[in-house]
Each structure stands twice: as C-alpha cells, then as structure tokens.
Image (cartoon, grey):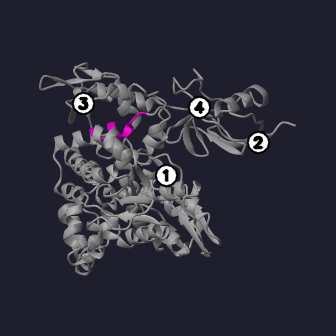
C-alpha cells in the first residue's frame, strides 16, 4: 500500500476575495519535491489549484512558495512524507491561490533605473533623480550575482521588509537590479545607485540563509550599507555602536558603577535626546573582563591533551556576560579538552552593521594573525557567539575576500557543533544528570546563516527530564545594535512581536539562546531570565 501524507494548501479566490485552507491526501515517493506534490494535486485531485512553475530545474525562480511558513523554491525542496502546509510566498499580495503579485519588484527596478544615465525623463512614472549614493562597478561581483534566479525568496524571508513599505530592505531587487547592469556615471566611473533602504537592512542574513541559489547576499548587503553610510556620513552614534569593544573595555574598569549609569532613566533619556539611542530596550551589563579572571590564559597551558581549542570569546562573553565564557571553558575542560584564550579583537560585525567595512576588515586581519599560530599548532577555534562564528567561518572570506582567512574558516566551530563532533565520533563521553526544566529556545539568525542545523538542541535533547521547545520566530528584532537606534526601534519591535507571541504561548520557565542581543530581546518581551545553553549543559554534566 502506498504511503500517503496530508498537504494543507492555503487557497485564495480573487473573485470573492476570500481565503481558506484545503486539505489533500497525497501519495509519497522518495525524493519527492514540493512542486511534484503540487503537480500531483492539480493532475489527480483538484485541477482548480493555481501555482506558478516553468523550468522545474531551479533556473527560473518562478515556483517559489511557502513551505510550513518558510519561503522555498518548490522544484528543489523535497518533502519527507510528514504532513505539510503550502502557502503563497510571504510578504507579497496574493493574486490567486499560490500566485503572488511581483509588481512591487518591477516598480523598484524602474525606481533604480530613474537614478541612472539611462533615464533622462520619466521611467514608468518615476522622475529622474540623482542617487543618494553609488557603488563603483569595480566592486560589484557579477559572478556571484549571476547565480540569482529572481525567485524573490530572499525578500520574502526578510523580516524587516515585511514591516516596511518603500524604504524596506529588498535583497532580491538589490541583487537582480545590480546584476542587470543598471548603472550611472559618477566621477568618470560606472556605478550602481544605492538608496536609504540599504541602511534599514539589519544584516540579520535571513535572506542569505533562505537563498536557494547560493548567492552571497551577505556581501551585496554589506557593500550597499557601507556605501550608503560612508556617502551620506556616519552618525556619531553609529561610530560608537560600531566600536562597542572600546566602550566595553572602558566600562569593565568599574562594571558596577557603569551598570548603574547605563540603566539610569536620566542617562537613557539623555542618550536618546543627544545620540538618538532608544531608551526602550534593555542595555547590556558589564562584568569584570574574562582576562582579569583568567590571567593564566595569556600564556599557553603546560597541560598537553589530545583535543585542543583556542577560544574566540567575542566581546559579549569577554566583557558583558563572562559567565557564558567561564561555563564554556568549564564544560570543555570537564570533557578533557585543553582550552586557551588568545589575545583577540572584536570579530568586526558591529562595524559592518554600522557601515564601516574598512575598520571591520582591519579587525578581521588582526584576528587572522592572532589565531594563525594556534592553527599551525593544530588547535581548533571555538566560540559561544553565533555572530562571531559566522564572521570567522564565512564573512572574512565572502565579504572581505581575504584569502588568508580560509584556514581560520576551515577550523572554526560553534561550541555545540564542536562538542557534537567529538560526541558523535566517540572521542568524549557525555555523562548527563537530569535537569527538570521547561525552556524555550530562540534560533539566532546568524546560526541559521551557517546552515549547520541546531547543534545546541541536539545536545540539550540528551539531558534527562529537560524540555526545550524551539520557537519559530524569524528574528528577535534586536539584531545587535539595530534595536538601539531610535528611528529603527519601532521596526525592531514589530519584527520581535513573533518572538513575543511564541514565548507567551509556550510559557517556559526560562529562555535560551546563544546570541547576547537575542537574550536581551527575549527578556524584554517576556520578563523571564534568559541564558546561554552552555550554562544548562554545564549544570547537567557529571564530572
């Protein structure tokens, strides 16, 4: 007897302007795609079902739909025989069933065209204007952009585009228009026009994680944001937020006093009025720096063990939440792993996010040089911060194009990813005691961008009596320093509503996430304590 599964399809009737969800019983075959499933329904069960498809080979991008709420390319996404829900591509007006209106993208194209030398008068209703900023054509990686299918999955996956109108980030249009050769001439050079919507990109990289064609959207987004900020002028606030490492270092000289100051309503109001730093979200706290607590880490350990790691702490675990770093070191040492904490710089992401790629590249080169001796001695690099691991694994090579970063990328691991590798290969023995607790876990955007699954969930599920539920929120909305910017805070809050609703529904005892800013936003929307998952693992690990 053939295996079957249920397919729930979101239908929309344009004549009556009504929608409903219709359920179909569908035969399952190995390697069956979403598009094959839709074809089966139309050919055998309901010929009124409307959807787009053309090449059926992941070349045209026309068959994009939402699978269980997430945008995918139907022709190259497989089903596993479990019940699924298929809907139209999110964040686009629906025309009929799974067919959406993509005219907004075409309008954006003409808006960009109106800012080039190709348009002297009017371009489809857009009057010719000079661009706010331009990216020199010499910096455009056409080989990378040529992979774009025009499927608009990336824009559909963008949580910030969903909350904005014309000024929202639009990664699919940025890439497709940039690659189409829509250029203007500036100072004798051909260049691509950049608008304010690039500054509203948070660099959450949900677009990069969702792209079915492997386009380095991280590079295009970072370049456009950097170009806009450097052309229009970087705000003092953004310079300070980009160089947060310097403020962290200074604040840890007197952490108690500075924690009281930054949480004072008077100081928060003053920061909002003078620097446009929102007074609403929780501020980070400061601790004694990690190096002050572990001075011996400045020198190589005399202990020689089979497994050796150099710990990239990141700014948050080094200056703000040092308990995370100390718990990580304790867990690794309990598992028989030698841990060193080399001198290091900020990973550079705050600088990229605030439009200063040149300074971020300097940080990258400093870290590559700092960790090279450890890599040469056979050490692996681990970090508790998913944004840091993303920078070391992909951004130093994909965004900055630093060839020397390849060896660093090859041996960098998210902490749980590294522990799972040792555990699955029987290199270590995880002895875990029960932890009776109900928790909710938020997946950091920069973990999704690494496409390594949920390594900490794999670990936590091994703890007896421990219940962890994974929330399906696209983004917490904080996005590093993004949520601290007063003009962006309302957008940030709107993006975070999905997280709030999920936490309210699950009603956990505590929240979990690897990302420091995500932890702050989770606490703000729930009032619950939120910690790094490594602290749970430490409490469960038997010596």
- Mark 4 lies on residue: 76
- Mark 3 lies on residue: 139
Mark positioned earlier in the residue sequence (3 or 4): 4
Are the two marked residues, 3 and 4, in contact with CB atoms closer than 8 angstroms?
no
Which residue is outermost to the right? 1
CA gap, disc 4 to disc 2?
19 Å
Q: Quadrant of residue 286?
A: bottom left
User: In the rendering, at what x and y percent does residue 30 appear?
Assistant: 72, 34
* Residue positioned 44% across, 69% down in the render: 333
Mark positioned earlier in the residue sequence (3 or 1): 3
Quadrant in which the N terminus is drawn: top right
Kindly report which numbered mark, 1 or 4, lies closer to the viewer in this rendering: 4
Q: Which mark is residue 474?
A: 1
Are the two marked residues, 1 and 2, in contact with CB atoms closer than 8 angstroms?
no
Mark positioned earlier in the residue sequence (3 or 2): 2
Q: Is 520 part of what is drawn in magenta?
A: no
Mark 1 surroundings: few (<14), some (14-19) or many (≥20) residues within 10 A = many
The one of 355 and 409 positioned closer to us in this rendering:
409
CA gap, disc 3 to disc 2?
49 Å
- Mark 2 lies on residue: 5
Kindly report which numbered mark, 4 or 2, lies closer to the viewer in this rendering: 4
Segment colored magenta: 215-224
Mark positioned earlier in the residue sequence (4 or 2): 2
């Amino acid at each position: 007897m053939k295996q079957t599964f249920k397919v729930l399809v979101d239908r929309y009737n344009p004549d009556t302007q009504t929608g409903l969800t219709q359920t179909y019983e569908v035969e399952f075959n190995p390697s069956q795609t979403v598009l094959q499933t839709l074809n089966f329904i139309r050919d055998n069960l309901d010929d009124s079902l409307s959807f787009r498809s053309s090449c059926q080979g992941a070349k045209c991008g026309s068959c994009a739909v939402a699978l269980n709420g997430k945008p995918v390319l139907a022709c190259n996404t497989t089903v596993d025989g479990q019940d699924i829900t298929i809907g139209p591509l999110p964040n686009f007006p629906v025309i009929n069933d799974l067919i959406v209106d993509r005219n907004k993208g075409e309008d954006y194209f003409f808006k960009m065209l109106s800012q080039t030398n190709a348009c002297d008068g009017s371009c489809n209703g857009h009057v010719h204007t000079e661009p706010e900023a331009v990216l020199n054509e010499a910096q455009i990686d056409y080989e990378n952009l040529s992979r774009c299918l025009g499927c608009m999955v990336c824009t559909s996956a963008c949580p910030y585009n969903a909350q904005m109108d014309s000024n929202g980030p639009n990664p699919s249009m940025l890439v497709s228009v940039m690659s189409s050769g829509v250029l203007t001439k500036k100072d004798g050079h051909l260049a691509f026009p950049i608008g304010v919507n690039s500054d509203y990109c948070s660099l959450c990289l949900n677009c990069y994680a969702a792209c079915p064609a492997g386009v380095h959207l991280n590079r295009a987004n970072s370049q456009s944001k950097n170009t806009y900020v450097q052309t229009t002028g970087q705000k003092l606030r953004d310079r300070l937020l980009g160089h947060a490492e310097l403020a962290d270092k200074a604040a840890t000289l007197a952490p108690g006093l500075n924690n009281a100051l930054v949480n004072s309503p008077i100081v928060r109001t003053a920061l909002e009025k003078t620097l446009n730093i929102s007074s609403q979200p929780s501020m980070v706290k400061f601790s004694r720096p990690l190096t002050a607590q572990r001075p011996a880490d400045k020198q190589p350990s005399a202990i020689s063990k089979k497994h050796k790691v150099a710990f990239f702490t990141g700014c948050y675990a080094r200056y703000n939440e040092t308990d995370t770093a100390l718990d990580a070191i304790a867990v690794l040492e309990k598992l028989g792993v030698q841990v060193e904490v080399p001198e290091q710089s900020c990973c550079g992401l705050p600088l990229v996010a605030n439009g200063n790629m040149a300074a971020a590249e300097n940080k990258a080169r400093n870290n590559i040089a700092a960790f090279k001796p450890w890599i040469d001695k056979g050490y692996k690099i681990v970090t508790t911060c998913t944004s840091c691991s993303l920078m070391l694994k992909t951004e130093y090579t994909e965004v900055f194009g630093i060839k020397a970063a390849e060896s660093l990328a090859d041996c960098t691991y998210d902490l749980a990813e590294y522990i799972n590798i040792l555990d699955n290969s029987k290199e270590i023995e995880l002895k875990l005691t029960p932890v009776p607790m109900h928790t909710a876990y938020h997946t950091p955007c920069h973990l999704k961008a690494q496409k390594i699954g949920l390594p900490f969930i794999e670990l936590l599920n091994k703890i007896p009596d421990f219940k962890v539920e994974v929330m399906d929120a696209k983004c917490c909305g904080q996005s590093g320093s993004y949520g601290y910017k007063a003009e962006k805070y309302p957008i940030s809050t709107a993006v975070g509503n999905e997280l709030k609703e999920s936490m309210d529904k699950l009603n956990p005892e505590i929240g979990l996430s690897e990302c420091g800013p995500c932890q702050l936003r989770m606490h703000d929307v729930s009032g619950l304590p939120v910690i790094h998952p490594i602290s749970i693992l430490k409490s469960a690990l038997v010596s």
